[in-house]
Image (cartoon, rainbow, N blue to C red):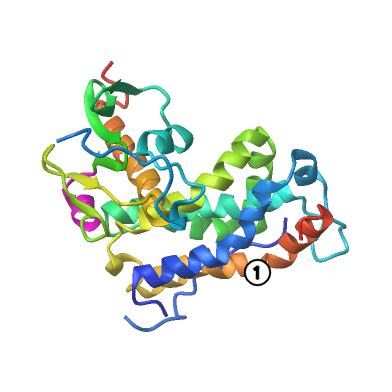
């Protein structure tokens, strides 16, 4: 292969309650067509759920844990993740996102339809939360705690 | 010059959309090289995915770092690497992706673009859209890069009878 993205041109620019949301069987409108209208299913299809991630599924949704500590939760049209305070504050500025009652740094995404924009955030935020959670379990010498 | 993340994300999504057709090709169609003397430059669909998504993964790495800090070490290393090795970087990418199972190639094709967009929603605009060097990087390595390789994509899809 011979082509590559252009390298940066430094001078080019000079300006500056759980389980309460059940997924509908079909999307209410076309925006979500082709995308699972269930956060758990969406994560099953896209997320890295391999070890050390654990998944516990119950009547109030699926909880995703690392080292026994939850870092994400999903049920129907609702997804919650622990992103940490800085990222969470940015996430709160995007549509359909509110603070989660789970604690500081947690956000709750609850769109009416899981369309492209919502799905992208779920996939990305799950991975960010997973990485943060895995990082918490790593000791200073680089080994896992368990 | 983008001033709002949503505007960039919409344009990036539109620019990438033609490449989504690659997911509809069979493994055999993806493995078949295009003529070396044509606009496809001899690339196969699989090699095109490797190149496009491989670089997109770098953009994703940078976005992840900028979501949690002011600077991206990945970007700094990549700039230095490119300056030192040029197309050797692409050769390395091609070799690495050639070793991947096709299922992994397909998975990355379908998940990395969305993960990039979702990650960018939580990167402060001051660290990318409103920072000149990073603005150029994100536009250049996504939207402009996709446009650069449309002739290869069209050749791959035409060869497969999908365009």
User: Badge 1 sits on which subunit?
Assistant: B
Placement of B128 over or under B77, stated as above or below: below
**Residue depicted at 44% across the width and 57% down the height:** A31
Q: Quadrant of residue A2?
A: bottom right
Range covered by the magenta-colored residues: A83-91
Give the image location of residue B12, x and y in percent: 49, 66
Circle 1 packing at 10 Å, graded few (<14), some (14-19), many (20+), is some
- Circle count: 1
The C terminus of chain A, quarter of image: top left
Give the image location of residue B90, x and y in percent: 65, 53
Q: Nearer the viewer, residue B75 or A27?
A: A27
Q: Quadrant of residue A64?
A: top left
Q: Nearer the viewer, residue B24 or B153?
A: B24
Q: Is residue B17 left or right of residue B60?
A: right
The residue labelled by disc 1 is B148
Asked if one can make out residue B74 in the rendered structure from this viewpoint, the answer is no
> Is A107 one of the magenta-colored residues?
no
Q: Looking at the magenta stretch, what is its main secondary structure?
A: helix
> Is A85 one of the magenta-colored residues?
yes
**Residue depicted at 65% across the width and 47% down the height:** B23
Task: Please identify the residue farthest to the top as the structure is shown.
Answer: A146
Placement of A11 over or under A7, stated as above or below: below
Give the image location of residue B83, x and y in percent: 56, 62
Secondary structure of residue under mark 1:
helix
Q: Is residue A48 left or right of residue A107?
A: right
């Amino acid at each position: 292969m011979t082509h590559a993205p252009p390298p940066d041109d430094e001078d080019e620019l000079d300006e500056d309650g759980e389980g309460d949301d059940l997924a509908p069987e079909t999307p209410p409108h076309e925006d979500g067509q082709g995308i699972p209208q269930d956060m758990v299913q969406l994560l099953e299809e896209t997320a890295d759920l391999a070890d050390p991630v654990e998944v516990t599924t119950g009547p109030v949704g699926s909880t995703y844990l690392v080292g026994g500590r939850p870092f994400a939760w999903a049920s129907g049209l609702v997804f919650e993740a622990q992103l940490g305070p800085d990222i969470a504050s940015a996430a709160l500025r995007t549509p359909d996102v509110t603070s989660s009652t789970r604690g500081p740094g947690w956000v709750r995404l609850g769109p009416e339809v899981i369309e492209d924009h919502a799905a992208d955030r779920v996939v990305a935020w799950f991975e960010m939360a997973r990485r943060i959670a895995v990082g918490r379990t790593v000791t200073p010498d680089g080994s896992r705690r368990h | 010059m983008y001033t709002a993340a949503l505007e960039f994300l919409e344009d990036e999504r539109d620019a990438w959309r033609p490449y989504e057709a690659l997911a509809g090709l069979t493994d055999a169609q993806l493995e078949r090289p295009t003529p070396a003397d044509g606009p496809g430059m001899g690339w196969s669909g699989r090699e095109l995915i490797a190149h496009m998504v491989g670089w997109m993964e770098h953009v994703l790495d940078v976005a992840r770092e900028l979501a949690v800090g002011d600077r991206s070490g990945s970007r700094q290393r990549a700039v230095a690497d490119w300056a030192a090795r040029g197309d050797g970087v692409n050769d390395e990418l091609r070799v690495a992706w050639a070793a991947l199972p096709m299922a992994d190639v397909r998975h990355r094709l379908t998940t990395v673009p969305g993960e990039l967009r979702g990650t960018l929603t939580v990167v402060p605009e001051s660290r990318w859209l409103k920072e000149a060097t990073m603005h150029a990087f994100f536009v250049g390595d996504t939207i402009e890069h996709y446009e650069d390789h449309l002739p290869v994509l069209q050749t791959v899809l035409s060869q497969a009878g999908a365009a």
